[in-house]
Amino acid sequence: MKRVAKLYGIVGKVAGRYIAAGYSVEFNHPTRYGPIHIIARGNGQMLAVDVVYERGKLTVETARSILEKAKLIRARPVLAVYGLGWNDVPEELRRFCEESGVKLRVVGELELR
């Protein structure tokens, strides 16, 4: 997991959590709407994960984008917010994610042994 975090930076840190949970991961899968940061497969499911670590990119359009990308590959959409707290996530984004089925995950620093 440390190696993945070193190679891919913040996206690698988020992917390390999925690897630790038993998923196999693929990075930067291309779609016509742009690349999906992480595709995690395992436990009979496939997740399309986009990582946001800047407050300015935390918008409804970002969630709508991962929703469209996930539909293309028939995966469950996940929006991972790294380094920001729940208070930094706008209320309209939370509502949109809840209504449309996008999982919203707030991820902090993971201590690796």
Image: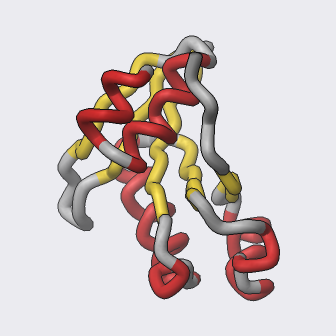
- Residue 2: horizontal and vertical position, in percent? 41, 24
Q: How many marks?
A: 0
* 101 or 105, nearer to the observer: 105
* 71 or 84, nearer to the observer: 84
Q: Look at the picture and state if 16 lies above or below 71.
A: above
Q: Look at the picture and state if 76 lies above or below 25.
A: below
- Residue 52: horizontal and vertical position, in percent? 48, 65
What residue is shown at x 44% (from left), y 41% (from top)? 74
Q: On the picture, is 23 further left or further right than 101?
A: left
What residue is shown at x 45% (from left), y 55% (from top)? 50
- Residue 56: horizontal and vertical position, in percent? 48, 86
What residue is shown at x 56% (from left), y 12% (from top)? 22
Quadrant of the image containing the C terminus: top right
| Quadrant housing residue 110 | top right
Quadrant of the image containing the N terminus: top left
Name the residue furthest front.
Answer: 113
What residue is shown at x 65% (from left), y 50% (from top)? 107
Q: On the picture, is 21 further left or further right than 94?
A: left
Q: How is the image coloured?
A: secondary structure
- Residue 65: horizontal and vertical position, in percent? 42, 70
